[in-house]
Amino acid sequence: MTRGQKVGRWAGRRLARRLGKSVPIVGTAVAVAYLAHSVRRKGLFGGLAHTALDALPIVGAVKNGIELFTDDWFPDRPPEAASGRRTCGA
């Protein structure tokens, strides 16, 4: 193995370690960015609980993994048919 290959592997491991440390911070930032959207879809309590669980690094990953095979833990509110507001799909 040449010196350049050793330096390349060392740099790759160092970069992977740095990126691995930033993953929980990025995941929390994404969850908080979708807070308003979740509250609109699920209501105040459901949206806050959904975002709070998603913001926790390990808990959010487990919750989302379980929700792949089951239904949402915090279901969406029923659409309001009587209101004059249009939804995204209408």
Image (cartoon, helix red, strand yellow):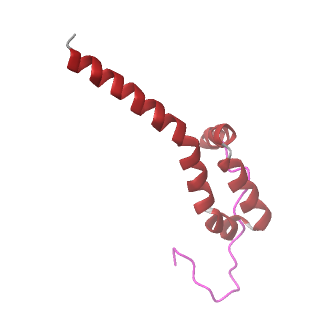
* Quadrant of res 5: top left
* Quadrant of res 30: bottom right
- Classify the position of the N terminus by image quarter: top left
In the image: residue 49, left or right of residue 21: right
Q: Is residue 50 above or below residue 12?
A: below
Task: Look at 62% across and 43% down and name the residue there.
Answer: 64
What x and y, as percent, mark residue 43?
74, 68
| Start-end of magenta stretch | 70-90
Tell how many labels: 0
Find out whether residue 76 is within the magenta segment. yes
Task: Look at 69% across and 86% down and name the residue there.
Answer: 83
What x and y, as percent, mark residue 86?
57, 83
* Quadrant of res 76: bottom right
In the image: residue 87, left or right of residue 43: left
Q: Is residue 56 above or below residue 32?
A: above
What x and y, as percent, mark residue 60?
66, 43
In the image: residue 30, left or right of residue 50: left
Find out whether residue 78 is within the magenta segment. yes
